[in-house]
Image (cartoon, coloured by chain):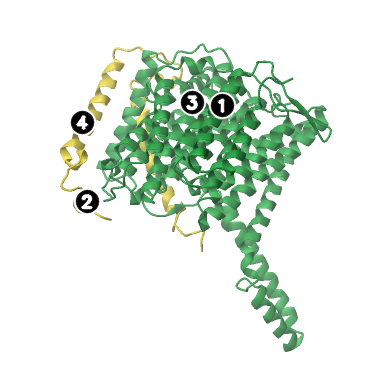
Amino acid sequence: MAQNHHAPDDGKTHMFDKPENVARVRYALYALCAISVVAELFIHRHVDHPWEVIPFFYCIYGFAACVILVLIAKEMRKVLMRDEDYYDE
Amino acid sequence: MMSSLLPFSIFFIGAGLALFTKGILRAAIMLAIPIVGAINLYMTPADAASNVTLLGYQLDLLRVDKLSLLFGYLFHLAAFLGIIFSLHVEDRVQHVAGLVYAGSALGAVFAGDFITLFIFWELLAVSSVFLILARRTERSYGAAMRYLLIQVGSGVIMLAGIGLYAMATGSTTIKQIGLQNWDQGFAGMASWLLLLAIGIKACFPLLHNWLTDAYPEATPTGTVFLSAFTTKVAIYTLARTFAGTELLVYIGAGMAMFPIFFAVIENDLRRVLAYSLINQVGFMVVGIGIGTSLAVNGAVSHAFNDVIFKGLLFMSMGAVLYRTGKINGSELGGLYKSMPWTTGFCMVGAASISAFPLFSGFVSKSMVMVAALEEHHSAVWLALLFASAGVFHHAGIKIPYFAFFAHDSGLRPKEAPINMLVAMGLAAAICIFNGSYPWLLYSMLPYPVDYQPYTAAHVLTQSQLLFFSALAFVWLQLRGLYPPELPGINIDAEWFYRRALPAIGHWGRNAAAAVYNEWLGLRGAVVRGANAGLYRLHGPDGVFGRTWPTGRMAFWTTVMLGAYVLTSYF
C-alpha cells in the first residue's frame, strides 16, 4: 500500500495530514458527548419504554450497541470469511 | 376518457427515443422524460382511470391515490437524479435499460389489478438486469444470471398466487389481503404465495442475497438506479396488501438487525451499502407490519427519504469507483484530498441515513419507532434502536471514513465529473430540505400527520445515541479492537445455492458415475474403453461438461424456488 509521503501532492499538506487536526476532531466529539450528557439534566425526556428510566439510557445503549456489534462481527468473520475468488474457482 | 398519459408510457416512449439517438440529443431527451412525466402526473386528475382488456382480463393501468402518487413522484425524482448522474456514460444499453426500468416501477405502483402488477413486476426484472450485465465482467455476468433467475422466480410465484387469489375471490383487484391460514383453502395459499413473492423482492431474511450479490456488481451508475426501484416497489405493494400483518413486524426487525453485522466486516463498500439498504427496508417492513396510520406514514416517508439518501451514498461510491477503479475499503482511503465535493456529499448522505437532526432520516425513521412503542412492541423497539446505532456505525461512519479518510491510499483521483456532482448536490439538498422542513413530505403521506419530529426530547435522545455510537467507534479504533478492512468475501445465504447444492449435485453425479462404471466394468474392456471416451468428453472436465456449472446452477435454483413454493404450502 502506497504511503502518504509518496503521494503526488507537490508538497501540499492536507487537513488530516497533521495529527493535531485529527485530535481536534476527537476532542470535538468528546465535547459533543459531554454536552449531550449535561443536556439530559435539563431536558425532560418522557418514558415510554421501561428501559428509558435508566439515566443516560441512550448514551449507554448507543455505546454498548456499537461495541457489541463490532465484537460479534469480528467473531463472525472467523466463520464467514473466504478468499475473494471463493465462488469463482 | 383520458386527459393525461399513463406515467410508464412516457418512460417507454423515451426509452425508444434514446435507443435511436446519441450525444447531446439523447441527453436532452433523457433529462426531459422525468420532467415531462412529473408534469403529466401533476395534471392527472384524481379520478383518472385507464382500463384495457387483455385476453379477456380487465386491466386497470392507472389507479391514482395518495399512496401511488407519492411513489410516483418519488420515482420521477429518483429517475431524474439517476439520469443526471449517468449523463457522461456513452452506453446505449444502460440508458435504455434505466428508462425502461424506471417506467416499469411506475407501471407497478399505478397498477390497479394484480395482472398489471405482475407484468410490470417481471419487466422490472428483465430491464434492470442489463444494468448489471453492462459492467461486462465475468463476475457481473454470473451475478446478473442469478439475479434474473430469482427475480423472475418471484414473478412466477406471484402469478401462482394471483391465480389462486382470483379463484378464491373472483377478483384481481389489488387491495388489502392480509395473511390467512392454510385452512382457508385457495385464499390462504394465495396470501402466502403473494407474501413470498413480495418478500423476495423486499429482501426478507434468507431471501435477500440476490441484492447483496448483484447490486455491487452493476455499473457505477447502474447501482444508483437499482437501489431506487425494485425494493421500493415491493414496499409499496406490501403496504397495499399486507398492512397490519404482525408477522411482518418480526421479519422487519430481523431485516433491520442481521445486515449490520455483515456490513461491519464487508470490504466492498458498495456491498456495505447493499446490506444497509436491507437494514433500512427492514424499518419500512416493521412500519407496514404495525399497520397504524403513524406506522404506515413512517414506512412510506422513510421509503421516500431512503431512495434519496441511499441513492446519494451509492452515487458517491459510484464516483469513487468510476475515478479509481477500486471500491474495496482495504484499497481506498485519503480521497478527501482530491475529491472534496464527493466527500462532502457522501457525508450528507451518511448523516441522513444515520438520522441526525436536520437530516432526512430523522423525520421518518422515528415515526416507525414511536409507532412500535405505541403498539407495545417493546423488544422490537430495542432491536430497531440497536439497528439505528448500527447503521450509523457502518453506513454513517465506515463508508466515508474508509473511502475518504483512514489511512492514505496514495490515490489522487480527479474530482467526480460535473454531472455526477450536480446529481449528488441535488440529492444532498433534498436530504437536508426534507430533514429540516419535513412538512411538504408529510403533506403527501397517505394518512394525515399528527407527529412532531422536532421535540427537545427526540433531538436529545437521538443525538446521545449517535454521539456515543461515534465514541464507541473512536474507542474501538484507539484500542485496536476495530476489525481492519481486509480483502475477502463473507459467505451468506447464497452459499446454499452457489456452493452446497452444486456440491451435492456434483457428489451425486460422481457417485452415480462410479456405480455405472463398476457395472460397465463387468462387461469387458471394449465397453469400458468407450465409456472412458464418453467420460472424457462429457465428464466434469470434458469439452461438453464445461457448460454444466451454469446449467447446474439454473437447475438447482429452479429446484430451490420449487422448494420455497412447497414449504409455503405445508
Cα distance between the residues tagged 4 and 1? 50 Å
Badge 1 local density, few (<14 within 10 Å), some, or many (20+)?
some
Q: Chain B is drawn in which colour?
A: green
Q: What residue type is labelled 4?
A: Tyr
Asked if marks 3 and 1 fall on the same chain, the answer is: yes
Question: Where does the image place residue B189, in percent across and percent down from the top left?
Answer: 75, 35
Disc ID at residue B36 = 1
Q: Which residue lies under the disc numbered 2?
A: A8
Q: Nearer the viewer, mark 4 or mark 1?
A: 1
Disc ID at residue B374 = none
Disc ID at residue A27 = 4
Front-most of B138 and A58? B138
Q: Which chain carries label 1?
A: B
Q: What residue type is labelled 2?
A: Pro
- SS under mark 4: helix
Q: Mark 3 lies on which chain?
A: B
- Residue at screen point 48% across, 27% down: B305
Q: Nearer the viewer, mark 4 or mark 2?
A: 2
Q: Which of marks 3 and 1 is nearer the N terminus?
A: 1
Q: Mark 4 lies on which chain?
A: A
Asked if A80 appears above or below A50 in the picture, the reply is below
Question: Where does the image place residue B221, in percent across and percent down from the top left?
Answer: 47, 42
Which of the 4 image quadrants contains residue B124?
top right
Left or right, B66 with respect to B462, comes to right
Where is the N terminus of chain B found, in terms of image quarters?
Answer: top right
Disc ID at residue B381 = 3
Where is the C terminus of chain B found, in terms of image quarters?
Answer: top right
Q: Nearer the viewer, mark 3 or mark 1?
A: 1
Asked if marks 3 and 2 fall on the same chain, the answer is: no
